Amino acid sequence: MGVGRFVYTPILPLMHTQAGLSAGAGANLATANYAGYLVGALAGILAPALVRSRAVLRACLLVLTGTLAAMPLTHSTAVWSLLRLAAGMASALVFVVAAAALLHHLRDHPPHLPGWAFGGVGAGIALSGLLVLVVRPVANWRTAWWAAAVLTALLGAVSWNLRPDEAPVAAVDGSTAGPRTHRWFGALFVSYTLEGVGYIVAGTFLVAAVGQGSPGWVGSGAWVLVGLAAVPSAALWAWLGRRWSRPGLLFTALVVQAAGIALPALVGGTAAALGSAVLFGATFIGISTLALGIGAHLRFPRSVALLTAGYSVGQLLGPPAVAPLLHRGYDRALLPAALVVLAAAAAAGVLRIGFPHHMVVLGHTGREQQRESTEDARSTAAGLPQHAPPYPAD
């Protein structure tokens, strides 16, 4: 899923120079993928049987591979948009099935284990960047897409026999939330929605922005570093969240991410580009982990569904919002994205004021909490890259 969804980012510069793709069309293709991801995630939430179906998982792995292989067969931006839309839907369902399976089969294991598993998305990002880094000196954009399809097929073969969660999931009763949590949840919702806007601009255009002012290998190399930094980040931030204030950690992660996004535009050069990649990769999954964990702690009704809906809408708004700036260079999009993430940090700062760290929630047995975690995993798919489970708060 990490390769199938995110390989577009390192291939985008090749499509501009070799396939004649305009900057605006590139933003539209990204938006189509994010729209498909939202549709797939909602399908997993509204039709729970999809999440428990091995046939659905296998069909989505085939669709994901096929859409990558079909990209070089046309020059039509309309067809490309449909292919990226389908890839987004398949990616979301793959993630939803995997998330539910992890939380079901690892429910008696330490909670950092699902975090490491979700780091597989980061590994996919790293592999996609490495693939383009190897291909670009010797081949063109078509070969890059076909190589990505082959890599996805190989990884899909390894995961072909993944055993989904076969247990029925009970509906979640959100009646335990009190009105006193509303103001904190409101700040969290604003923060996470703004993060969706800023994160996706960097996630889509970082490689192209870096490539404009650096040697050809730096853009793809930076994307490899993004993936490598993301691999341990979910487990690390979840561990930190059990020892320090989650609102404080969320504020810190957002400020660090904003600095990383702005770095290539403000400083330039290879060192700044690579440093930006590490900071961005180390925070984007962690921010999802922390935000969803805070929502679970507040016990606001349907908190994860609401948060991921806002995050997904932010992802849809990001690329079109910066599209008018792209004709002057991709680095022009990074500074507004960094400012949006700083605004998200400001909202997270409001969240820290009087936050109920020791709120006690009654009436939840261990089994009920497990059911909530599985339901939340389905909801989180809409917000990922993100790609982290909602760890219990207490």
Image: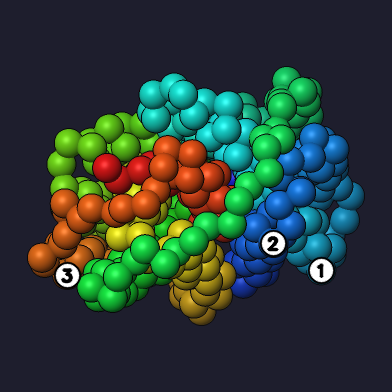
Task: Work out whether 138 lies above or below 10.
Answer: above
Closer to the observer: label 1 or label 2?
2
Mark 1 vs 2: CB contact within 8 A: no
- Between residue 224 and residue 243, name the one nearer to us: 243
Q: Residues within 10 Å of mark 1 (few under 14, many from 20)?
A: few
Which numbered disc covers residue 46?
A: 2
Could you tell me which residue is drawn at 67 percent across and 37 percent down?
Answer: 167
| Residue 88: percent from left, percent from top | 69, 54
Q: Is residue 34 visible?
A: yes
- Indicate the secondary structure of the residue bearing disc 3: helix
Mark closest to the chain's N terminus, 1 or 2: 2
- Indicate the secondary structure of the residue bearing disc 2: helix
Which numbered disc covers residue 214?
A: none
Question: Hey, what amino acid is under mark 1?
Answer: Ala
- Between residue 86 and residue 190, name the one nearer to us: 190
Residue topped by disc 1: 78
Question: Hey, what amino acid is under mark 2?
Answer: Leu
